[in-house]
Each structure stands twice: as C-alpha cells, then as structure tokens.
Amino acid sequence: MVRLAVVSNAAKTIADSVDRARAAESLGVESIWVTQLPDYRDMSLVLAAYAAATERVALGTGVLPIYTRHPTAMVQMAASLDELSAGRFILGMGISHRVTVETMWGLRLEHPVDSMREYLTIVRTSLRDGGCDFQGTHFSASWRYSGPRRPDMKVMISALHPRMLELAGEMADGVVLGNCPPDYIRDSVVPALMRGREKAGKTLDGFEVVAIITTSLTADRPAALDVFRKTMSFYSNLPFYRKVLDQSGFKAQLEAGEVSDAMLDELGGVGDERQVREAVERYRAAGVTLPAVFPFANHAGAAGFEATLEAALRA
C-alpha cells in the first residue's frame, strides 16, 4: 500500500475523534497527525486517546508550538506519549506565528531559527542521553529525565523558509509543511533541506518530508471551495505563509484580497475522487515522502472523513 498519513485534529466529541482514529487505522494509513491550534483541545491528550484506541498506526504532532512548553516539558510529554503508544509517537514542533505568540500569549517571538536550534538541542540531547546541561540565549536546561525514553524517537520541525529548512535538514529527522504549494516544495524546500543535510554530512535518504494537504471528496465543489477559501483567506494573512504564497505566484491576487480557485486547486484536492488523488500525486512528485491528507466537510455535499481518505489512498 502507498504511504499516506491523515490529519485528524478532533471531531465534535472526543469519542467521535477516537472513532475516526480507529477508522483511519482500519483503512491502512501509516500515521495519524494532529495540529495544536490556539483554540483547540490539548492535542497531546487527544493523541493519548488515539494511542489507547489503536494498535498499529503511528501518531504524530504536526505540530506543537514550542513557546507553550519548555523543552524539558516537551520531552516529558513526548516520552510519555511514546510509552503509551508502545513506540509509535513522532514529535513535530514549530515556532507558531507572531500574532499567536505575542498577541495571544504575551510572549516574545524573536530570532526563531536560533530559538529552534537551542530548543532542538535540548530535546534531542535529553531523549538520547536522559538529560542535558545546556545554557542558551533563548532556552536553557540542566536536568535529568528518569522515565522510559526511546533515544531514536523521530523529531521533526515545521519550516517554510530557507534558514529554518536548513536547520530541519541539519538537526531533525524530517520537516512538516503546511499551506505549501508543490512547486515551492520542489524548487525551494527540497534544495534548502539538502543544504542542511550536507552541513550534517548526510543525504536526504531517510529524511521525512511531510506535507499537509487540504482535501474534500464532495458532490458540491463550489460549496467546498468556499469553505476552503475562508480558511486560506485567514492563513494567507499570516506573514510566514504569505511570503511562500507570494513567491509562488499568488501575490497580485492576495494583494487584491482574492483567493482564486486556481490557488486552492494548487494547494489542495477538492472535488471528485480524481481531484483528490491528483492532489496527493502532485505533492509526491514535488518531493514529499509522506502526504498527510486533511479531510474537511462543513458543507452539504461533503462525502465525509472516511470517503475522502479512501479516495486519497487510491492515489
């Protein structure tokens, strides 16, 4: 079976969310991912529920923001989830966005690449050695972890721009991409990752490139595109994403306050089964090793989570 992941943050209830996780495992996906948004449930606890309800499928965070957890707390959470899931956990971490970190949380987002480098150093050293003594400019830790841990747990970061992508290639096991057009992945992401791997004396062999792909199998494509358009109208105003979209040829329309159908079709797969499959195939062709479909509904014509996932699995 082809490699495919699914993003399943949460349904209306935890019980419904767990049912989706069971369904995803039964359909044969390789891994289930969750993303921590500011107004969502605690996704580490949601993954704990998924771990208890499943047996085989890997479980990943794509991603958890680093500013809400000190790196030692991140290690405690990750090692505990890995133990609960019998070694199925994948830790994905990200910077988040200035509006979230500074406006919502009252913290400071400064020197994001340097901050992530220090954070990664503490997390990776602690998982490998059971603790660390590290004094950084942004994050420090002098501690020991006595619980069970898996030194080779996969650790990934989200990245979009060259310096963070190079850091991912240098220090992480993979990268998690969101709202990232396939052409940008091919032309900008993969070369930057390769530069990072070269710094570490490694190749891209075994390095995971995860891309979240918004998808909906639907009998009402215009209604589904309207739902997707609202989402992208919000994300396109976040500077990290906006820079990528501007560089991908969408600058003029975004400056005019528009999100075209062509832009949505480049980013996701909305419509019939062919359109869902072709979206997954575009991302694979661009260098993505693990497409992660993100099924959405919220309109009358939506076929639903399982049907969209089944369509993607046929890609």
Image: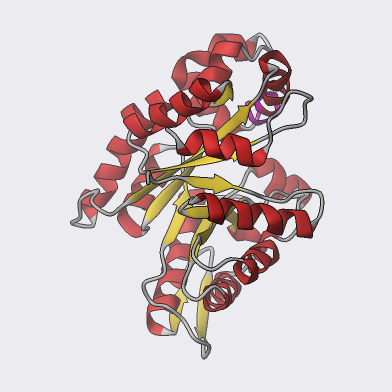
Quadrant housing the C terminus: top left
Q: Seen from this angle, which residue lies furthest front?
A: 26
Quarter of the figure with residue 272:
top right
Question: Which is nearer the eye, 223 or 304?
Answer: 304
Q: Which residues are magenta?
A: 232-237
Picture residue at 81% right of the left edge, 55% below the top: 13
Instruction: State the count of labels.
Output: 0
Q: Is residue 205 magenta?
A: no
Nearer-the-camera pick, 4 or 155 = 4
User: In the picture shown, does residue 152 fall above or below 40?
Assistant: below
Q: Residue at x 37, y 58 (%)?
A: 172
**Up-down relation of residue 246 to residue 114 (above or below):** above
- Left or right: residue 234 versus residue 25 is right
Find residue 32 and report its horizontal and vertical position in percent: 55, 54
Q: Is residue 60 visible?
A: yes
Q: Which residue: 54% across, 18% down?
A: 265
Q: Is residue 106 visible?
A: no
> Which percent across, then down, holds residue 46?
69, 62
Residue at the outermost bottom position: 146
| Vertical relation: 295 (above or below) 51 | above
In x, y percent, where is residue 91? 50, 62
In-image side of 193 versus 201 (left or right): right
Residue 151: where, in percent of width, then height? 38, 77
Q: Main secondary structure of the magenta part?
A: helix
Q: Name the quadrant containing residue 154.
A: bottom left
Q: Is residue 296 above or below residue 171?
A: above
